[in-house]
Image: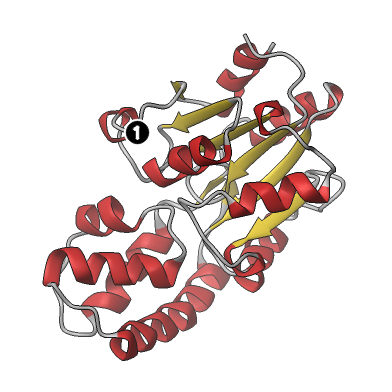
Amino acid sequence: MQHNIKMVVFDMAGTTINENNLVYKTLRKAINEAGFNFSLDQVLTEGAGKEKRQAIKSILTVYANINDEEQIGQIYQNFIAQLTEAYTKAEIVPQNNALELFTALKKRNAYVVLNTGYDRLTAQAIIQKLGWKETIDFDGLVTASDVSKNRTDPDMIYFAMNKFGILNSSEVVKVGDSIIDIQEGQNAGCGLSIGITTGAHTVDQLLSANPDFVINDLIDLLPLIA
């Protein structure tokens, strides 16, 4: 049991937002349009949770032994253009029990923060499409473009702690659907680093990162921090 939790940091796509892996399907399409033929599983395994330029770099390095910054940059620009268009057309809905959990955490005086490997413009566009309002539905947003080092580095969590005046990372919980999310929480020294099975990585993949817990639904978090 964890007491005195002051903030819960949630990943966005796959964790609090259900977009049916749209981002990784789009990422795969942009990479493959540059002359590759990677599967969605390959893209998820190496790319999930990472800042998206870094995701492209990891996928190309691991599967094609390519580390061409110019090519990575071109693929990234293509990806962002396609993702912006895809998100305007796609149905994006909250994950099951997301807002119910946010409300319950507010009643416990715990800040609800969203964090993401997206840049801020993309993240805000997604949140706007959901109709969520900062300070009403959730307390804060921190994105890959707000910090100099991205996951697995803990900078995004430290950024959020600084914003809300939290000094002790053991009073913070991190929840995410990828190995990278769990490692980010561990590297920040979070009181709990929790995987969730609603997104990019399977139970076995999540367990490989040694999370404190793996949950199947957001609402399952509440008894863990009672």
Q: Give the image quarter of residue 202.
A: top left
Number of marks in the rendered image? 1
SS state under label 1: loop
Q: Residues within 10 Å of mark 1 (few under 14, many from 20)?
A: some
Residue 219 is situated, as x and y percent measured from the top left of the image, at 61, 23
Residue 7 is situated, as x and y percent measured from the top left of the image, at 74, 34
Residue positioned 57% across, 64% down in the render: 144
Report the side of 93 relative to 181 (left or right).
right
Q: Is residue 114 above or below residue 1?
A: below
Residue positioned 74% across, 39% down in the render: 112
Of residue 144 and residue 108, the one placed in the foreground of this image is 144
Residue positioned 38% across, 41% down in the render: 179
Residue 114 is situated, as x and y percent measured from the top left of the image, at 66, 48
Report the residue marked by disc 1: 209
Residue 27 is situated, as x and y percent measured from the top left of the image, at 35, 69
Q: Is residue 174 above or below residue 58?
A: above
Report the side of 88 relative to 137 (left or right).
left
Q: Give the image quarter of residue 201.
A: top left
Residue positioned 57% across, 33% down in the render: 189
Q: Is residue 46 above or below residue 65?
A: above
Instruction: Name the residue type under label 1.
Output: Ala
